[in-house]
Image: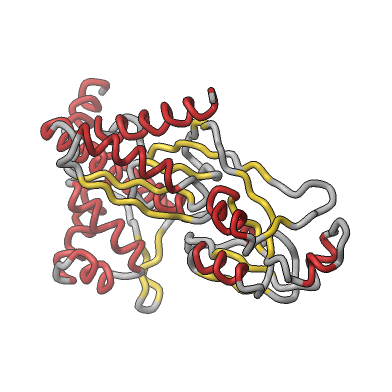
């Protein structure tokens, strides 16, 4: 019996395409939607799932109205099938990278708070070493980087948040966030230390979370008036024109501070925040040599800044 089981497990009877059809039916909500997703006929998807059920001797779905509903056995099959397809895709990606040497393209997610000049210096150094490698940079806010990792859009992220199921390497972070407003803003006219209660009476300028599952983490203060914008340049511009106050990275507004169009708010109990940054790989085992080298350049540059 043991030998028979070993032969059976080493020679799977279900193909990846059949598992793909099962997953598509679950995630699409039915056979019609699955066929559209896979660019197949409905009959071929239905046949693939029926064949899978027949070979395994289980019913993966019951039909409720026009919708295919998972059975308990089907739910177990779906979860394992999805993992199997993800593993197969990762294996193919690793094989392609191994055969091609350094990647032709690298995608990274960088938190918008991260110093732009530092990122550009690192990209330039990498470009000298691998001029043929294209770099795609996703500038993310809060949940954007973790979400891009989970969706497999990027090779690695530098983010203050580590998504569930991932490990992050703590980096030295030069990011210092301070509350600011135009010198003529009413908050500066109070002529004293400010409290959170003072801030609540004025407009808060916020940069929108780029993750689809947005939370209130970008909201520093609970206020009645808030403008939420899509990029930091807009938030800085609005603050410089006196339209509200904002928490902004000091490095990003150095020129505005020097010119006097923005001035730090004297907030009682601390008027700055250090933001921890983590280097998070989508999959360390399958990350290509190019992405690993770029990550090392960023690490090294941050170590040099810390030493200074």
Which of the image's four quarters has the N terminus?
top left
Q: How many marks?
A: 0
Q: Residue at x 51, y 62 (%)?
A: 232
Question: Residue 170 at what x, y percent from top left?
Answer: 53, 31
Give the image's coloring scheme: secondary structure
Q: Is 139 on the left-hand or right-hand side of 259?
A: left
Question: Residue 107 at what x, y percent from top left?
Answer: 30, 47
Q: Residue at x 11, y 32 (%)?
A: 99
Q: Is 50 on the left-hand or right-hand side of 62?
A: left
Question: Residue 10 at what x, y percent from top left?
Answer: 19, 29
Q: Quadrant of residue 198?
A: bottom right
Residue 12 visible at all: no
Residue ranking furthest to the left: 99
Q: Nearer the viewer, residue 222 or 215?
A: 222
Q: Nearer the viewer, residue 190 or 95?
A: 190
Image vertical order of residue 2 relative to residue 41, above or below: above
Residue ranking furthest to the bottom: 65
Question: Residue 210 at what x, y percent from top left?
Answer: 48, 61
Image vertical order of residue 13 relative to residue 39, above or below: above
Which of the image's four quarters has the C terminus?
top right
Q: Nearer the viewer, residue 257 or 56?
A: 257
Q: Residue at x 55, y 36 (%)?
A: 173
Q: Nearer the viewer, residue 75 or 184?
A: 184
Q: Is 246 on the left-hand or right-hand side of 111?
A: right
Q: Residue at x 56, y 64 (%)?
A: 236
Q: Quadrant of residue 296?
A: top left
Residue 293 visible at all: yes
Q: Quadrant of residue 201?
A: bottom right
């Amino acid at each position: 019996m043991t030998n028979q089981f070993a032969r059976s497990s080493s020679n799977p009877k279900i193909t990846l395409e059949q598992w793909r059809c099962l997953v598509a039916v679950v995630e699409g909500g039915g056979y019609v939607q699955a066929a559209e997703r896979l660019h197949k006929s409905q009959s071929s998807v239905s046949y693939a799932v029926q064949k899978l059920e027949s070979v395994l001797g289980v019913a993966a779905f019951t039909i409720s109205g026009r919708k295919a509903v998972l059975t308990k056995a089907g739910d177990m099959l779906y979860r394992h099938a999805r993992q199997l397809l993800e593993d197969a895709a990762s294996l193919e990606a690793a094989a392609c990278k191994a055969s091609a040497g350094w990647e032709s393209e690298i995608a990274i997610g960088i938190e918008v708070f991260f110093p732009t000049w530092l990122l550009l210096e690192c990209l330039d150094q990498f470009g000298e070493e691998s001029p043929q490698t294209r770099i795609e940079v996703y500038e993310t806010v809060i949940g954007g980087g973790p979400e891009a990792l989970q969706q497999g859009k990027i090779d690695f992220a530098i983010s203050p948040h580590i998504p569930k199921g991932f490990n992050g390497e703590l980096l030295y972070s030069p990011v210092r966030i301070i509350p600011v407003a135009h010198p003529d803003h009413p908050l500066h006219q109070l002529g004293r230390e400010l409290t959170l209660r003072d801030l609540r009476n004025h407009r808060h300028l916020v940069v929108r979370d780029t993750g689809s599952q947005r939370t209130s983490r970008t909201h520093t203060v609970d206020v009645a008036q808030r403008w939420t914008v899509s990029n930091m340049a807009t938030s800085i511009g609005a603050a410089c024109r006196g339209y509200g106050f904002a928490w902004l990275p000091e490095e990003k507004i150095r020129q505005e501070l020097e010119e006097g169009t923005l001035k730090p708010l004297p907030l009682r109990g601390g008027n700055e925040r250090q933001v921890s940054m983590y280097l998070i790989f989508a999959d360390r085992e399958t990350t290509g040599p190019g992405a690993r080298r770029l990550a090392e350049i960023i690490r090294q540059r941050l170590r040099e800044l810390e030493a200074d």
